[in-house]
Amino acid sequence: MTLEGYLTLSLMLFCIGVFAVLSQRNLIAVLIGVELMMNAASLNVMAFNRFSVTDPTTGQIFVLIIIGLAAAEVAIFLSIIVNLYRTRRTIDAEQLTELQG
Amino acid sequence: MDTLNLILATTFAPFAAFVLAILFLMRQPRLAQVVVIAGGTLSLAGAVSLLSAGPVEPLRYLWFTSGDIQLRFGFLLDGLSLMFGVAVALITLCVMVYSLGYMGHDPSKTRYFAMLALFEWAMLSFVYAVDLMQTFIFWELVGLASFFLIGFWYEKPSATAAAKKAFLMTRVGDVGLFIGVLMVLQVAGHFDVPGLLATEGGLVAQATPAVLTTITLLIFVGIVGKSAQFPLHTWLPDAMEGPTPVSALLHSATMVAAGVYLMARLHPLFMGSETTLGIILIVASMTALLAATMAMVATDIKRVLAYSSISQLGFMLLGLAAGSLFAGVFHLITHALFKALLFLCSGLFIHHLETNDMAQIGRGGGRRMRFATAGLVVGGAALAGIPPLGGFFSKEEIFAALGHDGVTLFSVVALLAAFLTAYYTFRMIFLVTRPQQVEAVDVHGDHDRAEPLSMALPVVLLTVGAAVAGFWGGDIARGLGIEAGHHSLAAMAPALAVVALGVLVAWLDFGRQTATRTGFIARMPALERLFTNGWYVDAFYDAVIVRITMLAATILYAAESRLLDANFDRLGFGVLGLGSGTRRLQNGWVQFYGGWAVVLVGLAAAYFGMSD
């Protein structure tokens, strides 16, 4: 596999994530889209780490931080969604428009 | 008590009564009456003791300083102000007591009495004012009180219209007065009345003749408005829409006399300008004659008296302009007494017989009302100038002053006006007391109640006052510091002759049993129409000035609403539309924002990627 192959896969994952974030009405699906984008970024970093960096530990540290960050973010995101569902009885992004002008 | 406390009590007692009544006693009219009359009594007592103490040095207190100009409030206690102050306080108290009966059944008595107190405060402060600006302020306050009292029965459209007319027409004059006062400041640098009148260093010495003429003419414009002189006289007859005691107090005896008083106050200034004196002579003699002709055809008793007031105010100004301070002031004081008396008598008739028409008053049995009839005869005779009553001596002084430089046009006009005065006065007396037949029974209820004590007492008091006021001439002259001259019988002869002629003609027309009871003027229909319509002055105002003003107002209204207002509206609505358009972008839908973010970031990336 070449660097381009990894980068193409990563780009495809990222675009799927963006599409999910923008198109899905269900907040859980939006969360999944965000996770996809994060993993695309991790894959990107690891690809560069493998092919063009002399010390391989640098990229691994970045990726470990991203994974930790994603775990924390999922916890917060899910708790927000649960609370939203309790108070509003919906997690449809299109109906949560109270901050409109 | 020292002078300061005394003068403060005199002027502020009515003010305190006004504040108490209007703020706290709206629901206790009886208590309000007591408070106001107590204030009036205190004022009269103060004014009388000030007069008996005699003139003192002016009291001045700094109000504020602005640059080099110092505005002071204070009291000028000389013979003129002391005497007129007593006249004002006396007549006000008489009218207040009289109003107990006249306004007894009115639901808003408190407002009425409070306004009387407001008027008395303003008028007394005006009379005693030491500073020209203070004079002006209280002059305006007097006009305000007059507005409230003319429009007292505000449910009546005619009363509110009359109040508005009086206010606006006097305002026309006041603009002139205000400019005059400001010009005085410009020339002299201060407003102090004694300083302005001083023979050395006064305004006459400071101002050039042209400037002095301008100033005095502008002040005279204010006097024309307030004292209802031609051509601003038409508000006064309409002001009779107010309650009759108000007419007695404001629109004959005291308030309209404020203009004459101002001229007397500033007499040395006026004496400094021949041109002004000439113009005043012309205006005043025209007014005296014109108003007398209107009085001789009026049928409403109050309007006769109103026109007569205008005419007599003209006489006072004639006396002052002819150079005699004494003649003007003397007539001012005698007129105040007998005209207040005449109005109060007419009020008795109106109150009991419920009509203003003189012939109806006569038929309804007006002469059965003893106090009113006696007052009417005495007051009327004083007004006509029958010796030895009040009006005779004071009018005599005016004729003497006018005849000082030989027989002039003005003295002829004044004699003619005096003839008409005697004629219309006795026309009124004969119409009331000698009707062709009288209704046998008094249909207006209990006759004994027709003249209650509260209304009879002031009438009796003023009857005595009007009868004896003529003998106060010497005292008044001394108070003014002038030597009163004695007039020979020959000098009095022409005046006596025209008065006698006037009474005789009135007797032939209205008095004798076989009289036609139509005036001799009815044989000249054109003249009668002219007089009845008040020389078409009001018609002229309606046709020209009112129409021009309305036209200008319409044009300005159109310009305002179509040009200014509409464009500002357009501006506002434009911004509003812009805002509500932009508002739609922020729809609260997160994914909409996110999509735009992706698109914009993508565009930015593409742009920077290509520029590399």
Image (cartoon, rainbow, N blue to C red):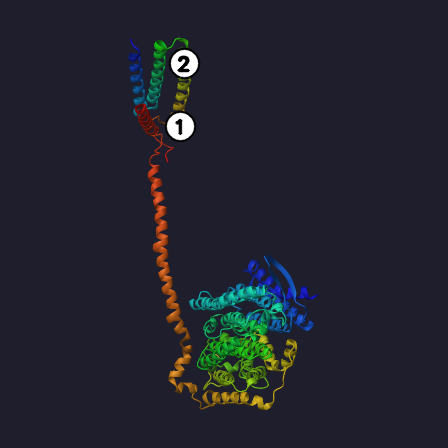
Pinpoint residue B355: horizontal percent, then vertical percent.
46, 76
Q: Secondary structure at mark 2?
A: helix
Among the two numbered marks 2 and 1 on one chain, the one whose residue lies closer to the N terminus: 2
Chain under disc 1: A
Where residue B597 is drawn, which disc sits there? Answer: none
For discs 2 and 1, the disc positioned in front in the rendered view: 2
CA separation in Å, label 2 and label 1: 37 Å
Nearer to us in this view, B99 or A101: A101
Pinpoint residue B101: horizontal percent, then vertical percent.
55, 71
Residue depicted at x 35% and y 57%: B559
Asked whether residue B70 is in view, the answer is yes
Quadrant containing the C terminus of chain B in the rendered view: top left
Asked whether residue B112 is in view, the answer is no
Could you say which quadrant of the image residue B73 lies in?
bottom right
Q: Secondary structure at mark 1?
A: helix
Quadrant containing the N terminus of chain B in the rendered view: bottom right
Left/right of residue B342 with respect to residue B41 in the rendered view: left
Q: Amino acid at mark 2?
A: Phe
Which residue matches tag 2? A62
Chain under disc 2: A
Circle 1 crowding by C-alpha within 10 Å: few under 14, some 14–19, many from 20? few
Q: Amino acid at mark 1?
A: Thr
Left/right of residue B588 with respect to residue B335 in the rendered view: left
Nearer to us in this view, B200 or B296: B200
Which residue is situated farthest in the right direction here? B1
Which residue matches tag 1? A87
Nearer to us in this view, A50 or B453: A50
Number of marks in picture: 2
Left/right of residue B597 with respect to residue B5 in the rendered view: left
